[in-house]
Image (cartoon, rainbow, N blue to C red):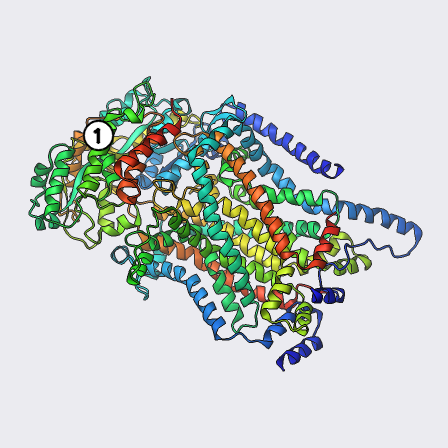
Amino acid sequence: MSTSIAMTRQRAGAGAARAASRHRGIGASRRPGWVTYLALGIVTIAAAYPIYYAILLASSDAKTIAQHPVPSLIPGPNLLENLHRVVTSDIGFWHAVVNSLIVAVITSVSVVFFATLAGYAFSRLRFRGRRGLLVFIVATMAVPTQLGVVPLFIVMAKLDWTGKLIAVIVPAMVTAFGVFWMTQYLDSALPYELIEAARVDGCTMIQTFWNIALPAARPAASMLALFTFVGSWTSFFWPFIVLGSTNPTLPVALQLLQASYFKDFALIMAGVVAATLPLIALFAVVGRQLVAGIMQGAVKG
Amino acid sequence: MAMTAKTGPQGSAPGSRPEARRPVPPRDEARQARRNFWGKVDVKLSPYLYISPFFILFAIVGLFPLAYTAFASMHDWNLIGGQGDFVGLGNFVDVVQQPRFMTALRNTFSIFLLSSVPQVIFAIVIAFVLDANLRARTFWRMGVLLPYVVAPVAVALIFSRAFADQSGMINSLLGSLGIDPVRWHADPLASHLAIATMVNFRWTGYNALIFLAAMQAIPGDLYEAAVLDGANRARQFFSVTVPMLRPTIIFVVITSTIGGLQIFDEPRMFDQLGQGGSDRQWMTVTMYLYELGWGSQKSFGKAAAVAWILFLVIVIIGMINFAITQRIASAGSATHATKKKVAR
Amino acid sequence: MRTIRKPWLMLTVGMASIATLAAGCSSSSTPAASGSASTSASAAAEDVTLTITTFNEFGYDDLYAKYEAANPGVKIEATKAATSNEARDKMMTGLAAGSGLTDVEAIEVDWLPELMQYPDKLVDLTNDDVKGRWLDWKAAQATTPDGKLIAYGTDIGPEGVCYRSDLFAAAGLPTDRAEVAKLLTGDWDTYFKVGKDFMSKSKVPWFDSAGGIYQGMVNQMPAAYENADGTAKPLADNTEVKDAYTALMTASVTDNLSAHLGQWSDDWTNAFQNDGFATMLCPGWMLGVIEGNAAGVTGWDIADVFPGGGGNWGGSFLTVPTQSTHPEEARKFAAWLTAPEQQIAAFKAKGTFPSQVDALKSQDLLGQTNAFFNNAPTGQILATRAAAVTVSPFKGANYFAINTTVTDAIARVDVDKTDDAAASWDKAVSDFTNLGLK
């Protein structure tokens, strides 16, 4: 029976590094049937079609798009040309890419670090006001953001940050979302025993965090990094208001492709593709990293 | 949950012991005292130090906006003209009596229910499937998360073409099946459904991955025990996976409650005018807030009042959802008890 | 409650420190326009950096360098927003915050009335060097009741009637643009009557959207919704608007002349490819939209006529916020950009139709033809259409709030078909009441 074989294998190889992947062995007992793959296939096609649709439009031209509201499934010949038009247009594409990278990388690293630190404290340390403060942090998310634009802009103007990347970076350096996420994740993924063991070994608080919590947080941290990166990469309104087109992030620059009264959808969609492809590439790398992180184990010793 | 109890002591279940205790290995007295002192400081202060970045940042960029809008909501406040007379709760009373506000509230709840509920359920099921020993696992996972990397604006551009009343892809598909075209931009429920589709498209895979990450942190022993108990896959799902996912489910439910009730971008980009339809069929509360504050009337005071009402609504719904989730997912009694202890 | 004292202390300290910021902000009357202040402060006294924000396509890109060359010591930094709505969001935020706007800001006529309520936020640009530069109605749009000129006109959108000559021919109507103009000369009833003739011999709807037509009608009313003192006319008693509404709804729904499309919707865009409608009201800037949406469709033409006289749709202005640290230099720059020569250059670059009297006589403009519209002399036609505009409609503080109640009513009947004309009007009246205007 495959179950017992799988389990034996796990037990035998139950090195700490694989601890978390153990339950996968159970799944091995039941390799999913074709129905599962079919369902997944449908979900994946539904997920991928709109992106493919964007590529279809980006590889077409304005006239063809106007004539065919439902595009044919075969891409047109103009993808590279349209991408070239995006890159070489006067919107400052490369400047925007660099800006977006700076903002996305800094905020991702910063959010992951500070959120993991706070999440660790909230989930595994004991201190006065713990619960109240966590509720407070979550509650700050419930304030509608539209309203904050004017006062936040006042703050930025006072700091003389308008038009500078720092105005986009600083408000996003640590998010309530991130803190809440890491708290909840570590709540279920980080056993007290490990912390206790580290403390018995004489680790200071920060050493415990560094050696125990941070490795355990890896899968969630890489996801949080991905979420933060994507969020930063696609965010439009605040960068638009506070930066403007002279020092834009990518969405702010790409929006300028829509400046003419007649919307050239081929060009606009080429912009969408130009902004999305780097994310998909990054995602391919991080996606693998996610799996790797899981293999190494959330409950690494 | 017999198996949970059984596996708990084996060590991988989160917190079979309530908290980390400070170890005091017997050593040389003076050094130990010093260590004790600094150790105590370390233990006492570290938590605050760790959470301080959020609060420092909040003090810089979050607090003033909050105070500003709270202040504005009590005044007759023009967006550009600035502060007017103090009106106390007048703005709140005013907006609550507006039929538009009630419409907006209805639409928000309707879209919220149509998006968040199926989204969370589908996400958890998809995650469970993805958690199995699939071939080409990475491929499927990435496929599911793909929509998330598309910017909301692009999603809106794509879907508004699909949902066009006369020439859209969906109505032509329905037409070829002999179904009458749906009036996506005229009928309130249809418009809510279309908007919910847009939301679900972008966020279901994202939530699925969140669940997946949490599922993978579930110790394998629990499943082993379940298998030994003769639990099939469905049984494992309800008696191991769901209870163990409790913190994550709470996270997803709370964040989608907050995000769902604040929904703005998708309904705003659902038609060319961005005001929620000729009869405000799909105007949400945040859109109403925006119209009040930034529209032709520029009543920032009333907009602020709506924002605070929405804040209260979110907190109330969030608490209700929290309670429901707690109840559904608290089957994992061991973890539950632990959590309570630590929380104190 | 010892547990929560600490955070509150922290919050209080934070609040106090922020409050200092806030206090400084509300009291300061000359906030720095950050973009310009930072760069100019370090430069020599005469050097100045002027910042400008535009949207869509103003055709100014090449002009900035020219101005810098002609004015040593001046540096131009240009920011652009894609659409008028985005530019508006940004401008409103900057005005609300009291800082952060550029020295010169472009505004569209649609939201100009909103700014007219705050003339003290904008520099009075009245100056001898621009006297008589614009068409009277264009200058009137930007002049406050007490005579301050708060913005310099850039372009306008004089309207003609665009039509499909092939569909006209199929229905037995004349196709030559002069004959079509003669056929349509008259009031709105004439336009609708010709539409009925047309539709008796064709299945194609006469016009695209009741909303588009209403825009043309309401812009011919000198004071549609408000009295001269700015007070709102009660919508229930507003017979002028009600009559236009009734006539339009009869034409759109009873006579079914409308294609029942919301302008700028995806259905509307796609309809250009499917013989969706035979005519539409078209300002100069619409020509490019039609050409793009109707790519591959032949037969579009434009007639030198407009129901009920003349009509203008859209157009923009340049203004100088009082936030600017160089209001005088900024004014000069705006005046230079809106001078006839520069507007002709912009027209040549991006086709923005000039609003300056002298520019309208330019041969560059009058000689322009448009191949897509059957080689129509569009420059000539639009210049005549600009001269035909006689009414400068009064738009006060509540114009757009009230106008929206009516256009919503029209869309409910024409596009959504959720209400009949009478019921929808009643809703508009109750929406008006809910606005709570005095």
In this view, the residue in front, A289 or B96, is B96
| Side of B131 where A244 appears, left or right | left
In the displayed image of the protein, which residue is found farthest to the bottom? A1
Pinpoint residue B309: horizontal percent, then vertical percent: 53, 36
Dot 1 amino acid type: Asp
In this view, the residue in front, C138 or B270, is B270
Residue C415 visible, this angle: yes
| Side of A47 where B218 appears, left or right | right
Pinpoint residue B44: horizontal percent, then vertical percent: 78, 45
Q: How many marks?
A: 1
* Above or below, B259 relative to B333: above
Name which quarter of the figure residue B27 lies in: bottom right
Q: Residue at x 64, y 55 (%)?
A: B247
Please, which chain is the residue tagged with disc 1 on?
A: C
Name which quarter of the figure residue C407 lies in: top left
Q: Residue at x 12, y 42 (%)?
A: C196
In this view, the residue in front, A211 or C275, is C275
| Secondary element at image label 1 | helix
* Above or below, C352 relative to B154: above
Pinpoint residue A18: horizontal percent, then vertical percent: 67, 70
In this view, the residue in front, A295 or C435, is C435
Residue C263 visible, this angle: no
**Which residue is label 1 attached to?**
C243
In the displayed image of the protein, which residue is found farthest to the right? B29
Query: Neighbour class for label 1 at 10 Å: few (<14), some, many (≥20)?
Result: few
Q: Which of the image's four quarters has the C terminus of chain A?
A: bottom right
Name which quarter of the figure residue C109 lies in: top left
Q: Which of the image's four quarters has the N terminus of chain A?
A: bottom right
| Side of A267 where C259 appears, left or right | left
* Above or below, B28 relative to C394: below
* Above or below, C407 relative to C26: below
Pinpoint residue A75: horizontal percent, then vertical percent: 32, 64
